[in-house]
Amino acid sequence: MTSPSAATTPSSELPSSSQGGFAYQVEATSPGDPGARRARVGRFSTPHGDVATPAFMPVGTRGTIKGVLPRDIGEVGSTMILANTLHLHLRPGEDTVAALGGLHRFMSWDGPILTDSGGYQVFSMADISTLDDDGVTFKSIVDGDRIRLTPERAIQIQQRLGPDVYMAFDHCPADPGDRRLVTEATDRTHRWLDRCVEVYRQAGGAEGSGQALFGIVQGGAFEDIRRASVDAVASHGLVGNAIGGVSVGEDRDAMRVAVEAAAPALPADRPRYLMGVGTPRDFFDAIAAGIDLFDCVTPTRHGRTHQVWTSRGRVNLRNAGWKNVDAPLDPVFRAPHVADVPVGVLRHLCLSNEMLGATYLSLHNLHLFHELMRLIREAIPKGELSALRDHWVPRLERRLTPDQFLAGDF
């Protein structure tokens, strides 16, 4: 299946960068694949280990990936995970996390950790927050108290939490198609980034603190605003850069426009992180545009609602037809601890509201996402990413019924 036109770029000519204890090296590209010329395989090195990219990062909002033991996170293929600044600030508080050994000990995870700044909550908690040019005031979802986040405060909280990578405080606009709102939010994001960088530099940057700051590109669905935001964010020369303000209600075409306008323009020698995106189709589209890192709650949230991706199609285990199926869920993506559990047992656990059911399905979804990334990393240097996409996306998106499963109609 290897493309005869695929070419290998000498490693000495591939982009790379290094700051403090962080480095990024592009290891391979895919010039022979017309549908994925910007795709690349890389390695993001951090003080807590290396991350082979493209990679998916599971989300542990409150310091835990819901329903999954820390031991099992690594077993299913995770190399880097997330936590959320605002939620941990609310409970138990960054001082408590620090007193208990920092996020790595708090989450029982020795690998790299990234924290989101709380900027997304400017969008998701708009009904209980007040925005101004200096920052955001939230009503606490824990006790109703007023919580004030400014760019400086968001960085200070993250520094105290102790992740490897933390994010700049940004403004995600409510409507990515409203040019006036998007322009205001993007300009505010750039002003806030200047303030975030100042606090970061005061701590010594990556060299002095052992932590890396990523800037965030905004711009909604507008190509020109996205490109201008890339210039503003990249001018700081940070360890890595992210694209925010996507997957916030816009259609897939609008998201594609935003990613394709921003990703190729970001520095090629730094990791590129697409925030909050997490379906197989989206992975392929964004990786073809040059994205390296992803995160989303989708695999674990779907697991908790009894929905799974499989190599044969998507499955909703609440369907009564799965009740007596005495066969494993997936012969291809065989997740640790789940691979040999009969589908009928999985359905029983789900319908009985047993916690183990959500755990099993979350593990399976995470394993499938990580294995898909592994296949992608293998396909890119061979010029086979487009072919891999054509093979897997229709299968993963197909709604698989119990009758089709039992009949072998895959």
Image (cartoon, rainbow, N blue to C red):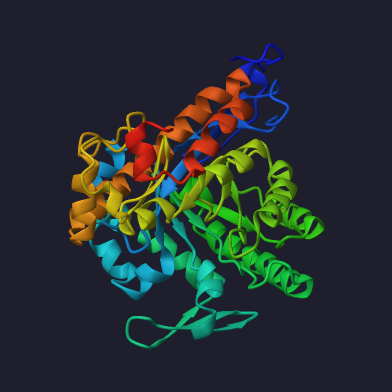
Residue at x 64%, y 19% (from the top left corner): 12
Which residue occupies the extreme right position in the image? 224
x, y (%) of residue 384?
60, 23
Q: Nearer the viewer, residue 369 or 295?
A: 369
Residue 209 vertical position relative to residue 34 in the rendered view, above or below: below
Residue 85 visible at all: yes
Q: Nearer the viewer, residue 360 or 18?
A: 360
Q: In this view, does 234 lie to the left or right of 92?
A: right
x, y (%) of residue 54?
52, 36
Count of labels in the image: 0
Residue 125 vertical position relative to residue 289 in the rendered view, above or below: below
Q: In this view, does 224 lie to the left or right of 320?
A: right
- Quarter that holds the N terminus: top right
Q: Is residue 16 left or right of residue 74?
A: right
Residue 203 vertical position relative to residue 53 in the rendered view, above or below: below
Q: In this view, does 175 lie to the left or right of 279?
A: right
Quadrant of the image occupied by residue 96: bottom left
x, y (%) of residue 316?
36, 52
Residue at x 50%, y 45% (from the top left corner): 207
Residue 47 visible at all: no
